[in-house]
Image: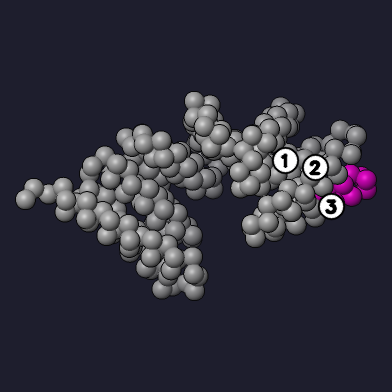
Amino acid sequence: MKPAEAKIIRLADRAMVRGISKGRRGLYQYAIEYFDQAIAACQSFKRNSHDVKLCLARALGNKGASLGDFDRNSEAVDCYTAAIAIYRQLADQNSNPSLTVDEAVTVMNKGWALIKLGRPDEGFPVLHQALEMRRQLVADGCEWVRSDVARSLYNLGWAYLKAERFDEALSLLNEAAELLQTLIAEGEEGREEDLAYVLGARADSFTGLGRFQESLENCNEVCALFTRLALSQDNPRFDKALTTALKERERVREKLSEAKPA
């Protein structure tokens, strides 16, 4: 890599690190400004460079995420579309699984942005596309992408749940739960929390279908998972999640009681 090229990438990477840090703290406007700096740095490099283009795609994707967090979803879609075009151009030149992994994240985020814009007819196919990209990676031997497949299944299931398309949501969430349970059994760390959220969404899907006993069974599993996580790790996020899960379980119990014949 030539010095000028390396300098551009260092500048862009530094700006992206700062942008991501600001975004995690909820300072989305500052995050966007840092991502704009990264984008400008990459665009200032006029020669053809795979690495600079890849850096530009990542900066655009990160900016899109911050715009989405800031509820500026139309602008976010534009960023995601530009990033996806770069990923595909790079893949045409030199196909690499890591490019597909990055592109799939951007495609998934674009799908969410379209749904939040009230354009589900466009958003759902894009979310399905992200899922199929990840499935294909696993089929091609990238076993480490299985957790990403589970994430896509959850995201798509959650989107159908919010659209009150409960049967479609349940099918996807069942597959996500089965995959996560397999990963947990294989010893992959950090998947218990993912499973808890999937089971929580599955409980909501059962509730939407009026299947309150099955919803309660899932709520019980969610409470058990968050209890274990709260006891094993000093993280207030798990305490908060457990409190929410307990309240939801009580709500489902009430619905089940009301549904039983007198």
Indicate whether 103 appears above or below 231. Answer: above
Looking at the image, which is closer to me, 92 or 241? 241
Q: Secondary structure at mark 2?
A: helix
Pinpoint residue 249: horizontal percent, then vertical percent.
Answer: 29, 58
Q: Secondary structure at mark 3?
A: helix
The numbered mark, 3 or 2, whose residue comes first in the sequence reads 3
Q: Which residue is mark 1?
A: 60
Badge 3 amino acid: Arg
Dot 2: few (<14), some (14–19), or many (≥20) neighbours within 10 Å?
many
Q: The N terminus lies in which quarter of the figure? A: top right
Q: Contact, CB < 8 Å: mark 2 with mark 1?
A: yes
Indicate whether 69 appears above or below 226. Answer: above
- Is 188 placed left or right of 226 in the picture? right
Q: Residue at x 21, y 55 (%)?
A: 254
Number of disc labels: 3
Q: Which residue is mark 2?
A: 39
- Is 242 placed left or right of 67 in the picture? left
Residue 85 in view (yes/no) = yes
Pinpoint residue 237: horizontal percent, then vertical percent.
Answer: 49, 65
Q: Which residue is mark 3?
A: 10
Pinpoint residue 258: horizontal percent, then vertical percent.
Answer: 16, 51
Residue 80 in view (yes/no) = no
- Residue located farthest toward the left when viewing the structure as drawn: 262
Indicate whether 151 appears above or below 95. Answer: below
Q: Secondary structure at mark 1?
A: helix
- The magenta region covers 1-13
Pinpoint residue 67: horizontal percent, then vertical percent.
Answer: 66, 44
The numbered mark, 2 or 1, whose residue comes first in the sequence reads 2
